[in-house]
Structures are given as structure tokens and as C-alpha cells.
């Protein structure tokens, strides 16, 4: 985790918790010539634009008060919902996703692929059990958590 992401995560967590929101993710990325500090928040039932603006104002105020500035370059601050395909990163994200349709990218192939979409049937501390539709036949894959590069909720078409 970058120093900026760590610093901002530590700064944002109490603000988000105070409002009883969940901190989903913090990223600091360069796109083209611009830098973006993105903070994703959520709550049961979803987050709205006013709540994002509230957190944005509070985070901006706190960041401006830090000395030395943890982000020396110019950047855009964005506070938003993670959307329908929210990332699954923390153990509690996976716990909430049991029974949901998810997308999983792996570091190494399991079976014929490094990418699977299916229903998260259950999980243990070490393994996800993902029920995947392979051409009309369902198969449950046991996916080691340590082998997951990325995971997110997915929309089933």
C-alpha cells in the first residue's frame, strides 16, 4: 500500500465511521497527466450524493490541515459509491457477498481459466466456493483466497 493511501485511509476511517458508513476503498492513481485521490464509501441501502459531498468536505478539510502535506502534487479528490460492481477486498466484504454473483480474477489458472464469475456459495478462512455455469452445467470451484488477484460483485446477464 502506498504511503498516500495509508495516510488517507487512516485519516478517512474515523470520518466515515462517525457517519456510520463503510470505507470500501482508497486509491491514488495517475490517469493521463492528472492524479486522482478516490475514496469509495457505502452503507446498507446505498450511499447518496449528499453523503459523498459531506465526506468529501470533511476529508478535504482534514487533508488541508496536515503538515507536512502527504500529497505534494496537485490532485482531484473524488468521493463516491463503489457502484453495483463494488470490489471485494476485506474479509467482511466477502462475508456480505455470500449468495451473491461475483467476478474473481486469479494469479494462476484453476482449471482452464484465471477468471471466473459465479455465485459465492460459501467461504472459509482459506477458500471460496464459487458455483459457475459452464455451458449449462454447474460446477463448484474451490478457490484459495491467497490466489485471488481481484474480486468484485458482478451483474449477471
Image (cartoon, rainbow, N blue to C red):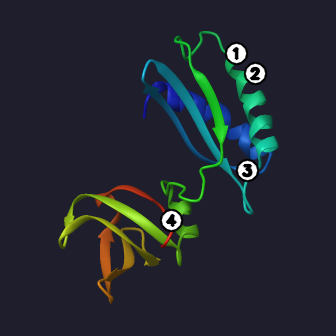
> Which image quarter: residue 136?
bottom left
Of label 4 and label 2, which has the lower sequence position? 2
The residue under the point 71% across, 39% down is: 14
Query: Around disc 4, counting alpha carbons within 10 Å, would you say few (fewer than 14), some (14 to 19), or many (20 or more)?
Result: many
Image coordinates for residue 127, horizontal then vertical, percent = 36, 71
Above-or-below relation of 74 to 97: above
Q: Which residue is mark 4?
A: 94
- Per the image, label 1 sits on a secondary structure element best described as helix
Q: Tags 4 and 1 in contact by the CB under 8 Å rule?
A: no
Q: Which residue is mark 2?
A: 61
Question: How far apart in space, not on screen, are marks 3 and 4 (Cα)?
Answer: 17 Å
Of label 3 and label 4, which has the lower sequence position? 3
Question: How far apart in space, not on screen, are marks 2 and 1 (Cα)?
Answer: 5 Å
Q: Tags 3 and 4 in contact by the CB under 8 Å rule?
A: no
Of label 4 and label 1, which has the lower sequence position? 1
Above-or-below relation of 60 to 18: above
Q: Which residue is mark 3?
A: 21
Q: Quadrant of the N terminus?
A: top left
Q: Which residue is mark 1?
A: 64
Question: How far apart in space, not on screen, are marks 4 and 2 (Cα)?
Answer: 32 Å
- Per the image, label 3 sits on a secondary structure element best described as loop
Q: Residue furthest front?
A: 157
The residue under the point 46% across, 29% down is: 29
Query: Around disc 1, counting alpha carbons within 10 Å, would you say few (fewer than 14), some (14 to 19), or many (20 or more)?
Result: few
Question: How far apart in space, not on screen, are marks 2 and 3 (Cα)?
Answer: 19 Å
Question: How far apart in space, not on screen, are marks 1 and 3 (Cα)?
Answer: 22 Å
Please name whichever residue, 136 or 92, is drawn nearer the observer in this view of the structure. 136
Q: Tags 2 and 1 in contact by the CB under 8 Å rule?
A: yes
Of label 1 and label 3, which has the lower sequence position? 3
Query: Around disc 3, counting alpha carbons within 10 Å, would you say few (fewer than 14), some (14 to 19), or many (20 or more)?
Result: some
Amino acid at each position: 500500500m502506498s504511503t498516500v493511501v495509508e495516510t488517507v485511509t487512516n485519516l478517512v476511517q474515523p470520518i466515515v465511521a462517525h457517519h456510520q458508513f463503510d470505507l470500501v476503498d482508497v486509491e491514488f492513481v495517475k490517469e493521463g497527466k492528472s492524479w486522482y485521490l478516490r475514496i469509495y464509501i457505502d452503507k446498507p441501502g446505498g450511499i447518496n450524493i449528499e453523503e459523498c459531498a459531506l465526506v468529501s468536505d470533511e476529508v478535504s478539510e482534514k487533508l488541508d490541515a496536515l503538515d507536512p502535506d502527504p500529497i505534494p502534487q496537485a490532485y482531484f479528490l473524488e468521493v463516491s459509491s463503489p457502484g453495483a460492481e463494488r470490489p471485494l477486498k476485506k474479509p467482511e466484504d466477502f462475508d456480505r457477498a455470500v449468495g451473491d454473483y461475483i467476478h474473481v480474477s486469479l494469479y494462476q489458472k484453476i482449471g482452464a481459466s484465471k477468471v471466473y464469475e459465479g455465485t459465492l456459495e460459501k467461504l472459509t478462512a482459506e477458500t471460496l466456493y464459487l458455483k459457475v455455469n459452464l455451458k449449462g452445467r454447474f460446477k463448484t470451484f474451490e478457490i484459495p483466497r491467497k490466489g485471488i488477484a481481484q474480486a468484485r460483485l458482478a451483474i449477471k446477464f
